[in-house]
Image (cartoon, helix red, strand yellow):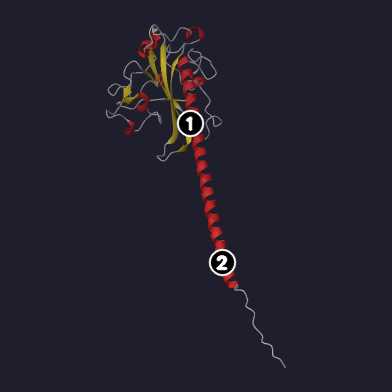
Amino acid sequence: MKCHEFRRLRQPNTTKNRGFVLITALIFLVVLTIISLAAMRGSIFDEQISGNQKDQILAQEAAEMALRDAELDIRGLRFDNTYCAPAGIAASTCGGNKRIAGTRPADATEAGNFWIASNSSVNNVYAIAPTSSARPTAPNLTNIGVYEGRGATSACGKPLWSAADWDTDTPPAAKKCTDGSSVVRTVVYGSFTGAPTGADIFPNGTRLPRYLIEVFEASDLGISASNKVFFRVTAVGFGRSAKDDGNATSVTLQSVFSAL
């Protein structure tokens, strides 16, 4: 009887195969995780850039609104183009404040020839020039934010808009000049025009923009043969986001304006 030799067939090494698959899967998982994190980081970065751009646009729009508000203030108009100067107009309808009597035209007829250098009322338009030695510590609120550009154009050794207080009406001691006098004061949007300041215009958390006005005659700007009075308006608008230093995003704009 012939005996047959039985041989055990070699089984594949499934343990090694499984180990290889596991390592490969882990590598793919790590790669996918890195890609996902990179994509997420890029998305967050893009969102931050977009948010900063929106905030910058918001601040610029606010500054532009302040420029227009200053022009209305100079013309003596409410936001709806009603004249604020007549005695019958209550200050409450013009933002709660009225400029000094005679320093703004009372109607369209008077406005046509009001802002000329030969008009004696123009000399009463601006507050004391804010120099380091002569600056009103508590200027008449009816003339706040308007300064003589023809005289001293600096405060604390800086241009008016650089030394101006764009935060509060009563700046803290740290923001005063070395002589102890307060920095140049500015006008809050709508203070003399009654312009709306609701949340539908300025979102909650947004500071109202501010402006200041400097008065010049044409000759001060190198314009000969002209009797016009010009105004340099500096306006600052604010966004909603705070920067690393804690201050809100801000945009500063300037314009030279003539009411004639």
* Residue at image location 47% in from the left, 18% down from the top: 71
Give the residue at the far right of this rendering: 1
Q: Are marks 1 and 2 in contact (CB under 8 Å)?
A: no
Q: N-terminal of the two: label 1 or label 2?
A: 2
Nearest the viewer among 69 and 127 is: 69
Which residue is depicted at the point 47% across and 27% down?
63
In the rendered image, the vertical position of residue 12 relative to residue 79, given as above or below? below
> Which residue is under mark 1?
59
Percent across and percent down for residue 187 are 43, 24
What kind of residue is marked 1? Ala
Q: Nearer the viewer, residue 220 or 27?
A: 27
Can residue 42 be seen by looking at this rendering?
A: yes
In this view, 24 is above or below 86: below
Q: Which residue is mark 2?
A: 20
Front position in the image: 112 or 36? 36
Quarter assignment of residue 145:
top left
Q: Which residue is pictured at 51% across the width and 47% down the height? A: 41
What element does badge 1 sit on?
helix
Under mark 2, the amino acid is Phe
Percent x, y of residue 136? 33, 22
